[in-house]
Image: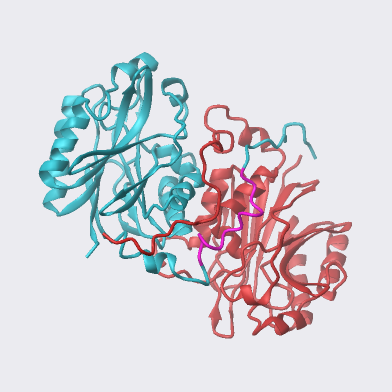
Chain colours: A cyan, B red
Amino acid sequence: MTGFILAGLQFEPALGDPVANIETSSRLIREAAAAAARLVVLPEAASAGYVFTDRADARRNAEPVPDGPVCSAWAALAAELDLWIVAGITELAGEKVFNSAVLIGPDGHVGTFRKAHLWNFEKELYDRQEDGFPVFETPLGNIGIGICYDAWFPETFRSAALGGADLLVLPSNWVPVPGQPEDLPAMANLMCMTGAHSNQFFVAGVSRIGAERGQPFLGRSLIVGPGGWPLAGPASNDREEIVLAEVDLIGSRAERLGNPFNQPLGDRRTDVYQTGDFTADLSGATA
Amino acid sequence: MTGFILAGLQFEPALGDPVANIETSSRLIREAAAAAARLVVLPEAASAGYVFTDRADARRNAEPVPDGPVCSAWAALAAELDLWIVAGITELAGEKVFNSAVLIGPDGHVGTFRKAHLWNFEKELYDRQEDGFPVFETPLGNIGIGICYDAWFPETFRSAALGGADLLVLPSNWVPVPGQPEDLPAMANLMCMTGAHSNQFFVAGVSRIGAERGQPFLGRSLIVGPGGWPLAGPASNDREEIVLAEVDLIGSRAERLGNPFNQPLGDRRTDVYQTGDFTADLSGATA
């Protein structure tokens, strides 16, 4: 049996308070473990909060991976509870600062993903990654990672899928999107759903709640199956919650990838796609 | 003023009966024109229906573009009513048969798009296009085209956007997707919404109703704004309907493409994307 319980931990990290974040995240990881979770996903920037005022502030709140205090606490917990953790962390790497997510297993740190698409003021806070979208092999299946705004780019899902990912996890700090209709899921949820469906893999989008320095966040964490429909969630906008779903990343491969007639990965037309930078100059055009 | 009324005509083409399809489509095009529409979009395969039994059957139901009877009737109507039409057509091109869509303006045929991603049994009926995703300049704005299953590939939206499209129109014969929850839009609708949002352009997905040879279709036609939310529709599953929305393809360019901080087209990381064929071999992998 290769199926297991995947958990998304939706909570409110405390800005500038790693000790509090170790405490809150540990409590929720233990709760997920008690529900038999083998992989738990935490939000973006879960180590020290998110809305830093400038690069120096981000740097002050960053820690080295894997030896910093929050990462070490998560590693100890993963070993004790025999599970995997993906969690957003503000990473100090020499002179550089990254908006990162770590993958930690029972035997320690497995790998780190650094956010590829920096959103809004993040461009002023963080360094630019050059690593693309690594896919990490684990006994649970192949895990790709994106962070928040990365999900706005279908290339994130596609790059992970082409790298062999069975699951894309998205630690996130989702924010409200203008024009949100009351009767539709959040745009972030829709990105997860279409990203899963187009790539025939699992997606776990896990966001935080609360607000920092006037920036409100949107929970709405969810786990999506390879058909594109939610297996768990979306959670509430504003309450601490654990979303849980049984998934089988490895056991579902034949069914997910085996249909010869109708296969969103195999049917791609890479010979005719445009994949370069956006260079269309529409500024001068008028009717 | 560059804004105009865009109309999607959701109806039931008749299999193997071009005369009936000229009659029905003309009635609806006139109705849209009476509502001041300048661009009307018809479903996929609106000239002669869709579920052909084999390649010979598809060929018998195909017509040359732009001189075939249905295309000529649409061109006459576009001239008379001073509007543009995008409509699905089964195209005969020498020995080849394509699942195509024509763009016709008041002055005649502007261009043809041939479906890039052939769905299911279509692979046995149609020839493979080599043209990619042309974008057609019109006084209304730049128009890209995809057909039905093309929308399952985010590369379709992206290729059109990178080609300078302000609007992607998707003549479609959508079918039910397994697992559809009652409280969520159809997956096709979600594809249109995230495709619009990720590319900051307009999307019009126009589908047919009814059934052919046991294959049921799903209406749910809609027009989506560049924010990703519906401007009109989704329409019903099964009723003839016209969806209408006022759009401004050219006048919205500065607002759509001008935000320097948060730009899903400009923020892309083409230096790190995977864009090749799917070659991951997951078949032998087990836990």
Work out whether A196 lies above or below A111.
Answer: below
Q: Nearer the viewer, residue A213 or B47?
A: B47
The residue drawn where x is 65% and y is 55% is A271
State whether residue B227 appears in this view. no
Q: Nearer the viewer, residue A52 or A198?
A: A198
Confirm whether the magenta stretch covers residue A272.
yes
The residue drawn where x is 58% and y is 51% is B155
Which quarter of the image is occupied by the N terminus of chain B? top right
Answer with left or right where residue B180 lies relative to residue B278. Answer: left
Work out whether A159 lies above or below A210.
Answer: below
How many marks are shown on the rendered structure? 0
State whether residue B77 appears in this view. yes
What residue range appears in magenta? Answer: A263-275
Work out whether A278 lies above or below B61.
Answer: above
The residue drawn where x is 53% and y is 52% is B193
Confirm whether the magenta stretch covers residue B89.
no
Q: Position of residue B213 (x, y in %)?
A: 58, 85
Work out whether A114 lies above or below A179.
Answer: above
Q: Position of residue B285 (x, y in %)?
A: 33, 60
Answer with left or right where residue A23 lies relative to residue B214. Answer: left
Give the prevailing secondary structure in the magenta stretch. Answer: loop
Q: Position of residue A5 (x, y in %)?
A: 22, 56
Q: Quadrant of residue A149?
A: top left
Q: Nearer the viewer, residue B287 or A102?
A: B287
Q: Position of residue B202 (x, y in %)?
A: 63, 48
Q: Quadrant of residue B152?
A: bottom right
